[in-house]
């Protein structure tokens, strides 16, 4: 370490964050020297990640509370270079979920992926998990392009190894390769992006791009950022890698990936949008369009799934859409000089980043517990699990309500900010178009309700559809406590959004570069009323519930084994229940054009038809209908170039000589050749 | 507590069953029958509250909580709307989002309770309820947006005053379109003909009624009462759009407003008498028409 900028010591926030991340990065190393089945490797790893996370959380909180934007220089391994790390409010906002979900996921994973059950890949998993948490923190701390790229690549690679933890399964390997392919595209885009930024500022990464830079160059930077960070975030047409990857990883890794890793795309986009001066209106509009598309189609695709983790993964795409809507409102506000839209949009965007990290991690933990208990990810084989695992069911309900944006939980608050930004723009003369995403968001919310009623109802309610579901058992406390922490956080942010308002205000102010003099979130959004409404709702439900519950308990005692009214049909069985697919069918049939569900319908004929089965599968339309056919066609074209690849050494030497001569000639000016020839 | 607040709460608590009674009475009269008294729903709910509960062994606490949440959310949503000349007890920028999401919360629990019973019929009802609501929500939000543009306000209390003054003369087209859209939303959300027939006796064709098939006793009473409260709240919304209700001040204004609500209930009775139920597959078409109607109103106002 060579010291802080201008000789001053680096701030405690930065030291805590760097220290915490180094501890997390090293957490898997001791386990490598211990035996495969040794429980101590896992214990040490969890301990180090947890301590590192606590340190990181403290650092993140300090960063939000009052970071001065100071920078720490570290000597790089390459001579003449240095690595720069720094903290500011945005770093704090994005680094908090890293350490919260990272630490809780590590605790959860200790039992979920215990060394006894998974001796073969447990060590690799823990090593990569710690490195992933650390690299996520480094991305938010990076203050120059090299550090950013290195951290980004560490994130991408550790993520790949985490996705392919169960690499004996070919579908897992396929998901991993697809992810790796998309990662390569992202890193290429990042190289281009940072080179462009260097052209302007003489420095890498997230320096200001002033308004006198040519419009075309600024637009190129914006579009590059939108595509590369959009891939990482999983925005709608660029999302194809996400569902398979999030479904294949172990659940606590899925929680980290879905809750935090994809947010790094949002982080990059927010940073880039922040440094681009005087954005034209079109950028904000394109963000609004992509956000609406992601939100709406994300939830539509989620409805078509019957793999619980794939379903949750598609909901990440939906929530990324909501986050992008917030960012879009803020960008439109900057273009049109409306500080109040900037404040509301940015507050909605950043708060939803937090909220989604909280409830999506909670839901993935819940899904992991269900998978752990039943051994299947297929919704159609579940049912009635609330009986065997009541605590998990309750916490999953909390996560479901929060992700649907329903009061009194946190999702409502951030969606309210986004709505307010959109509608404020909509009532302003001349910009009514800006409110058009609001009805789309409303439809998205209603579809999310449908989707989570489906998950909750099919997994936890009703009766068991298979013997695995019947045997479902409650998770141990070490898996329940992380979920409970997240559930409580969802409730606290939903009831008391005023707690985080100052942090959001500071972040929005820092992001907009001083465009927001004296704007206060509390003046724009009804924070106090949200608290009052949430508390009233809870108290009223509890009061009325208290009146009903004794009556119901008495009824249960008197007639403990009463069946459900079967409308006169006596021989009911669990098989007659609505399944996940049949429940969603009334909606998914409307979107057959997008979902392209493949069904296998049995032919039933004769008076005594043979037993048969119905199958349906909804793949990813972008991947199946566009990317794979395009890749096949490209491969076909490339085969034609094979005639030049005969494997003949002389031919290759000829190619090399020809290329060298061409390169030499390209450097030679024609006039010079002419004068040389004619002069003689 | 001011007198207007007390009257607001009292109307919210006491009026809902009367609307059901008026609808039933209208239908009976139009069918040439005498029909039950308009107070019958009060007797019914009272009777249900004194009965025992029969709980299926399949159900969990969500089944018990659902009627409670359904009623509480409808009543809380009722606090956000003004009553004729009296302003809403709670009004703040963005309360229309809370309004819509409270109703969505009620829907979440009602539908979950349907699945909680493990009965295919109730699953069917829940699927239909949610399968249609995703079209009523954007219609409602387009209506809110149009009203916000008309009134320049971001709270329901201000938005629902958009039809005051001479607005009906100046802005006839958008207001007609909004009213048509909100009427369809009301019919769909409250499970009336042409979307759902509350009097049908075949489980296969029902939506709301089949979803609450297993509720009994006080729980069923809460369900009925919550559904009626939702009807009241949405009727209040509609009445504000179609009539400048604040023109008559004070108590006479409130009385006139209640008469208006009863008139809308009678109107629903007329619709139920003269129309048949739509085929389930055609319901989304009607709802898309509502979205377009409200959306077009917004478009007209967006210049």
Image (cartoon, grey):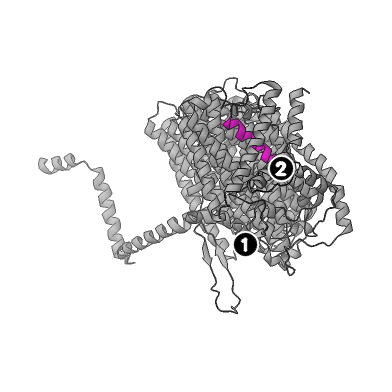
Mark 1 = which residue? Answer: A166
Magenta residue span? B225-244
Instruction: From the viewer's perspective, tell me whether residue A195 is left or right of residue A380.
Output: left
Tell whether B25 sits left or right of A551.
left
Determine if the magenta segment contains residue B234: yes
Query: Residue B21 — which label?
Result: 2
Foreground residue among A106 and A591:
A591
Report whether residue A309 is seen: yes
Is A495 within the magenta? no
Q: Secondary structure at mark 1?
A: helix
Residues tagged 2 and 1 counted as in contact (Cβ below 8 A): no
Q: Is residue A489 visible?
A: no
Residue B207 position within the rendered picture, expressed as x and y whole percent measured from the top left: 65, 53
Number of numbered discs present? 2
Residue A109 placement (x, y as % from top left): 71, 54
Q: CA distance from mark 2 to mark 1?
A: 63 Å
User: Secondary structure of the magenta portion, mostly?
Assistant: helix
Which element type, helix, strand or loop, lies under badge 2?
helix
Q: Dot 1: few (<14), some (14–19), or many (≥20) neighbours within 10 Å?
A: some
What quarter of the picture does the C terminus of chain A occupy?
top left
Camera-nearest residue between A622 and B204: B204
User: Residue B216's spot in the image, x, y percent?
Assistant: 79, 53
Q: Position of residue B169 (x, y in %)?
A: 50, 25
């Amino acid at each position: 370490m060579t010291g802080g900028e201008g000789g001053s010591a680096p701030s405690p926030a930065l030291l805590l964050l760097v220290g915490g991340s180094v501890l997390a990065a090293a957490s898997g190393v001791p386990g490598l020297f211990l035996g495969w089945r040794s429980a101590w490797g896992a214990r040490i790893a969890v301990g180090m990640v947890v301590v590192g996370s606590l340190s990181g959380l403290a650092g993140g909180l300090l960063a939000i509370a009052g970071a001065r934007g100071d920078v720490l220089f570290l000597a790089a391994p390459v001579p003449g270079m240095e690595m720069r790390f720094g903290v500011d409010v945005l770093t704090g906002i994005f680094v908090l979920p890293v350490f919260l979900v990272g630490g809780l996921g590590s605790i959860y994973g200790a039992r979920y992926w215990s060394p006894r059950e998974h001796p073969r890949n447990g060590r690799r998993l823990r090593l990569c998990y710690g490195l992933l948490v650390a690299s996520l923190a480094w991305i938010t701390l990076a203050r120059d392009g090299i550090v950013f790229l290195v951290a980004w690549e560490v994130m991408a690679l550790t993520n790949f190894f985490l996705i392919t933890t169960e690499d004996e399964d070919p579908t897992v390997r396929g998901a991993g390769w697809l992810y790796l392919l998309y990662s390569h595209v992202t890193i290429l885009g990042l190289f281009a992006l940072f080179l462009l930024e260097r052209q302007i500022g003489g420095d890498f990464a997230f320096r200001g791009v002033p308004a006198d830079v040519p419009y075309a160059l600024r637009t190129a930077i914006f579009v590059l950022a939108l595509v590369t960070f959009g891939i990482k975030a999983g925005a709608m047409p660029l999302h194809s890698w996400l569902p398979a990857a999030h479904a294949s990883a172990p659940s606590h890794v899925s929680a980290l990936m879905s809750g935090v890793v994809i947010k790094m795309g949002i982080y990059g986009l927010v940073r880039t949008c922040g440094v681009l001066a005087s954005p034209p209106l079109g950028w904000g509009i394109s963000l609004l369009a992509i956000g609406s598309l992601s939100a709406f189609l994300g939830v539509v695709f989620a409805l078509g799934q019957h793999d619980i983790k794939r379903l949750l993964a598609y909901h990440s795409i939906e929530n990324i859409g909501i986050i992008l809507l917030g960012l879009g409102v803020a960008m439109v506000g900057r273009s049109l000089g409306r500080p109040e839209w900037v404040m509301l949009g940015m507050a909605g965007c950043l708060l939803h980043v937090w909220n989604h990290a909280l409830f999506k991690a909670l839901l993935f933990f819940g899904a992991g517990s269900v998978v752990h208990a039943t051994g299947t990810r297929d919704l159609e084989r579940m049912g009635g699990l609330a009986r065997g695992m009541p605590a998990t069911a309750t916490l999953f309900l909390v996560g479901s309500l929060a992700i649907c944006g329903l009061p009194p939980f946190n999702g409502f608050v951030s969606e309210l900010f986004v709505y307010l930004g959109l509608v404020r723009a909509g009532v302003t003369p001349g910009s009514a178009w800006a409110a058009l995403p609001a009805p789309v968001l409303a439809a998205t919310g209603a579809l999310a309700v449908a989707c989570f009623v489906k998950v909750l109802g099919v997994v936890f309610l009703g009766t068991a559809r298979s013997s695995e579901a019947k045997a479902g058992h409650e998770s141990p406390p070490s898996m329940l406590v992380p979920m409970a922490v997240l559930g409580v956080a969802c409730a606290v942010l939903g009831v008391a959004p005023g707690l985080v308002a100052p942090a959001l205000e500071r972040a929005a102010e820092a992001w907009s570069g001083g465009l927001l003099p004296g704007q206060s979130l509390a003046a724009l959004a009804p924070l106090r009323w949200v608290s009052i409404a949430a508390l009233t709702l809870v108290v009223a439900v509890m009061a009325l519930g208290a009146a009903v519950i004794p009556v119901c308990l008495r009824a249960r005692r008197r007639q403990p084994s009463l069946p459900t009214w079967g409308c006169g049909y006596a021989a009911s069985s669990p098989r007659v229940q609505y399944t996940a697919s049949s429940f969603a069918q009334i909606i998914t049939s409307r979107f057959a054009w997008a979902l392209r569900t493949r069904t296998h319908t049995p032919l039933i004929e004769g008076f005594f038809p043979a037993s048969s089965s119905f199958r349906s599968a909804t793949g990813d339309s972008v991947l199946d209908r566009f990317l794979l056919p395009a890749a096949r066609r490209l491969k076909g074209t490339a085969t034609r170039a094979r005639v030049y690849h005969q494997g003949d050494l002389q031919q290759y030497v000829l190619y090399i000589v020809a290329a060298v001569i061409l390169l030499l000639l390209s450097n030679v000016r024609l006039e010079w050749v002419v004068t040389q020839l004619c002069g003689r | 507590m001011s007198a207007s607040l007390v009257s607001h709460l009292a109307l919210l608590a006491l009026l809902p069953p009367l609307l059901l009674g008026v609808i039933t009475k209208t239908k009976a009269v139009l069918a040439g029958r005498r029909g039950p008294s308009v107070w019958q729903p009060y007797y019914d709910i009272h009777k249900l509250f004194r009965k025992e509960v029969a709980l299926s062994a399949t159900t969990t606490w969500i089944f018990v909580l659902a009627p409670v949440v359904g009623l509480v959310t409808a009543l809380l949503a009722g606090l956000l709307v003004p009553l004729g000349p009296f302003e809403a007890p709670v009004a703040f920028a963005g309360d229309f989002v809370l309004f819509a999401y409270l109703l969505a919360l009620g829907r979440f629990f009602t539908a979950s309770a349907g699945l909680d019973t493990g009965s295919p019929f109730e699953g069917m009802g829940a699927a239909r309820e949610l399968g249609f609501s995703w079209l009523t929500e954007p219609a409602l939000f387009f209506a809110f947006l149009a009203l916000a543009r008309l009134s320049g306000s971001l709270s329901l209390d201000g938005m629902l005053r958009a039809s005051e003054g001479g607005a009906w003369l100046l802005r006839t087209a958008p207001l007609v379109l909004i009213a048509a859209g909100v009427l369809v939303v009301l019919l769909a959300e409250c499970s009336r003909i042409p979307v759902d027939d509350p009097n049908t006796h075949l489980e296969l064709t029902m939506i709301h009624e089949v979803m609450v098939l297993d509720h009994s006793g006080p729980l069923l009473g809460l369900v009925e009462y919550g559904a009626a409260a939702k009807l009241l709240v949405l009727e209040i919304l509609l009445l504000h759009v179609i009539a400048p209700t604040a023109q008559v001040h004070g108590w006479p204004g409130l009385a006139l407003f209640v008469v208006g609500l009863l008139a809308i209930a009678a109107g629903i009775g007329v619709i139920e008498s003269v129309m048949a139920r739509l085929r389930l597959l055609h319901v989304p078409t009607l709802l898309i028409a509502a979205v377009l109607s409200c959306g077009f109103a917004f478009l007209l106002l967006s210049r």
